[in-house]
Structures are given as structure tokens and as C-alpha cells.
Image (cartoon, grey):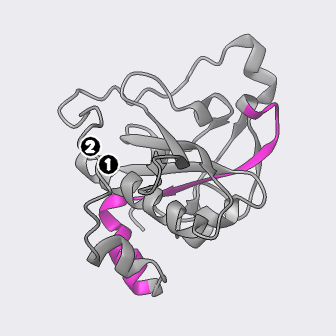
Amino acid sequence: MATSKLDGSVLGTLRTHSNVMEPLPLQMSLRLSADFHGQRMVESTRLCIKGTAGSSLVRAALFKAFHRYCLAQKVDLMMATGRRPVDRIYESLLFTDVGQTGAFYPMTFTGGVPHRVMYLAPERAREIYVAAQQPHTDFFFEQIHPDIDISGAKDLSDKLWMCPDPQVIPPAHRSHVATVAGTANSLSQ
């Protein structure tokens, strides 16, 4: 959660779900390709930013916190889903589509609204950002922001991650599950 230094009001939130013990929410709507099986993944959900002049800075700070959290937890892949036009935020942050570039999949947790499903390997993020000359590179990797504090987050780094893949889809969801046959890019990219 991002809060105002002036009055403590909430400026933005981003929730996370890990696949420590259960599949990610996105996996109830989309069967990921075999490339994703066994990967330690954390999905960002419910990105919500208060519409102010500083909203892009708040969003950048939340994603820096998300990235730092994933590094601390030894996560293999940061996952995100986004409807139009939110998907462009993840694209600008250099997340990669899990399947065909620009493909949208209906998500059961949003009432079937199509979302892009994307990932970014936190260990490779800096290298990817530098190579692409991404405008937030300095903010994410060089600048020190003591206000971005993840010390209160639950430590999952020493847990035995089950990384379950939902092989059995509940009957109510079977007709809504899409499949990604393969990825255009290797996960190491």
C-alpha cells in the first residue's frame, strides 16, 4: 500500500498472491504452458491508484516494492493480468505475454472480462530494463527509497513452495478455462 506522507491517506494498493500452496488466481482461468510448471510465481492483483498528479510515481513505487518483494522471496516470475488499457502499464514495465503477444483471455475472477496475462523474471529485470533503456531504470534500480519498506511482508523465501498447477479444474469453471499451448519467448528472457 502507498500512503501520503502529508496525511497518511491511501494513494494506491497492489495485492499479491503466491503459488506457495495453491495455484494463482489467474490459473483458475488459464492453463499456463509447461514452461511455467514448477516456477515460484507471485501474481499482482487489484492495482488501484488514486487519480492525482502523482499517480504515475505512486504506480512506479508500488511496482518497485513488488519487484523488491519478489527478489527477497526468491520468486522466479512476477505475474500480472490486465484488461485494456491497464495491460499497457505492464507492457511499459517490460512484462512479457505468457503466450501469443497481445492475446487476451477471459478471467473467471472478473466475470469473464478478457485480460492479458504477462510475466517478468525479477532476477533479470535490471538487465532487461537497461537493455531496453526503460525510463524507470534509475528509479527502480539506482535510487534508494527508504519509504519503500517491505520488512513487514510475510517471509516466504524459506518455505517449501508446492508450485501447484491446477490439473483438476472445478466443474463450474471448466468451460471458462483457456490454455496457453506454448510461449513465444523462453522464460529466461
Q: Position of residue 173 (x, y in %)?
A: 74, 20
Q: Residues within 10 Å of mark 1 (few under 14, many from 20)?
A: many
Q: Is residue 166 left or right of residue 188?
A: right
State the residue lying farthest toward the front.
7
Q: Is residue 43 left or right of residue 55?
A: left
- The answer to the question of whether label 2 and label 1 lie on touching residues, with beta carbons closer than 8 A, is yes
Q: Position of residue 126 (x, y in %)?
A: 33, 73
* SS under mark 2: loop
Q: Is residue 68 above or below residue 27?
A: below
115 magenta-colored: yes
Residue 27 shows up from this direction: yes
Q: Position of residue 53 (x, y in %)?
A: 63, 70
Please identify the quarter of the rendering in which residue 52 is found.
Answer: bottom right
Task: Determine the CA span between mark 2 and mark 1.
Answer: 6 Å
Residue 69, numbered label: 1
Residue depicted at x 59% and y 17%: 168
Q: Is residue 139 above or below residue 102?
A: below
Q: Position of residue 144 (x, y in %)?
A: 25, 70
Residue numbers of the magenta segment: 110-131
29 magenta-colored: no
Residue 73, numbered label: 2
Residue depicted at x 26% and y 43%: 73
* SS under mark 1: helix
Residue depicted at x 37% and y 68%: 125
Image quadrant where one finds the C terminus: bottom left
Question: Label 2 amino acid?
Answer: Gln
Q: Is residue 160 above or below residue 37?
A: above
Q: Nearer the viewer, mark 2 or mark 1?
A: 1
Question: Label 1 amino acid?
Answer: Tyr
Q: Is residue 8 above or below residue 155?
A: below
